[in-house]
Image: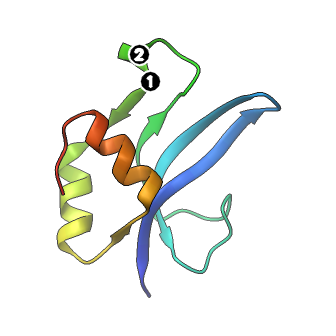
């Protein structure tokens, strides 16, 4: 199984929010997750938009999980380097 760190969409039409999750690469966007690592609320204020557990992200990356381009950009906004 190859794992991927990516976004899972929640919310309503025009009011999305996302969870940063670890999923099987072949799973659907809103499918079953392995672990939840944080969240991303693009509509909230700047200081409340992004929250994630850096230790868990580091463990998954060290174990070979691939990070999607979108999540990589979100993590870079919080000065988290991979």
Residue drawn at (18%, 57%), measured in percent from left and top? 82
User: In this picture, is 3 found above or below 70?
Assistant: below
User: In this picture, is 3 found above or below 56?
Assistant: below
Asked whether, in this view, residue 5 is left or right of residue 26, the answer is left
Residue drawn at (32%, 73%), measured in percent from left and top? 65
Please say if the residues under marks 1 and 2 sit with CB atoms less than 8 Å apart.
yes
User: Which of 33/61 is in front?
Assistant: 61
Q: Position of residue 1 (x, y in %)?
A: 44, 88
Judged from this view, the residue extending furthest toward the bottom is 1
Q: Position of residue 5 (x, y in %)?
A: 41, 62
Asked whether, in this view, residue 10 is left or right of residue 64, the answer is right
User: Which of 78/53 is in front?
Assistant: 78
User: Can you identify the residue that label 1 sits on?
Assistant: 49
Residue drawn at (26%, 65%), measured in percent from left and top? 60
**Any part of residue 21 in sight:** no
User: Which of 2/34 is in front?
Assistant: 2
**In which quarter of the view is residue 62 placed?**
bottom left
**Any part of residue 41 in sight:** yes
User: Can you identify the residue that label 2 sits on?
Assistant: 46
Judged from this view, the residue extending furthest toward the right is 13
Q: Position of residue 64 (x, y in %)?
A: 26, 78
Q: What scheme was used to colour the molecule?
A: rainbow
User: In this picture, is 67 found above or below 50?
Assistant: below
Is label 1 in a helix, a strand or a loop? loop
Q: CA distance from mark 1 to mark 2?
A: 5 Å
Is label 2 in a helix, a strand or a loop? helix
Q: Position of residue 72 (x, y in %)?
A: 35, 53
Q: Residues within 10 Å of mark 2 (few under 14, many from 20)?
A: few
Asked whether, in this view, residue 48 is left or right of residue 23, the answer is left
Residue drawn at (54%, 62%), measured in percent from left and top? 33
Q: Residues within 10 Å of mark 1 (few under 14, many from 20)?
A: some
């Amino acid at each position: 199984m190859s794992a991927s760190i990516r976004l899972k969409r929640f919310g309503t039409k025009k009011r999305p929010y996302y969870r940063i999750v670890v999923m099987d690469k072949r799973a659907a966007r809103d499918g079953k997750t392995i672990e939840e690592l944080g969240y991303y609320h693009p509509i909230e204020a700047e200081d409340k938009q992004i929250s994630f557990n850096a230790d868990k992200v580091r463990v998954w990356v060290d174990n070979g999980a691939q990070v999607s381009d979108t999540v990589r950009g979100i993590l870079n906004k919080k000065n988290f380097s991979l």
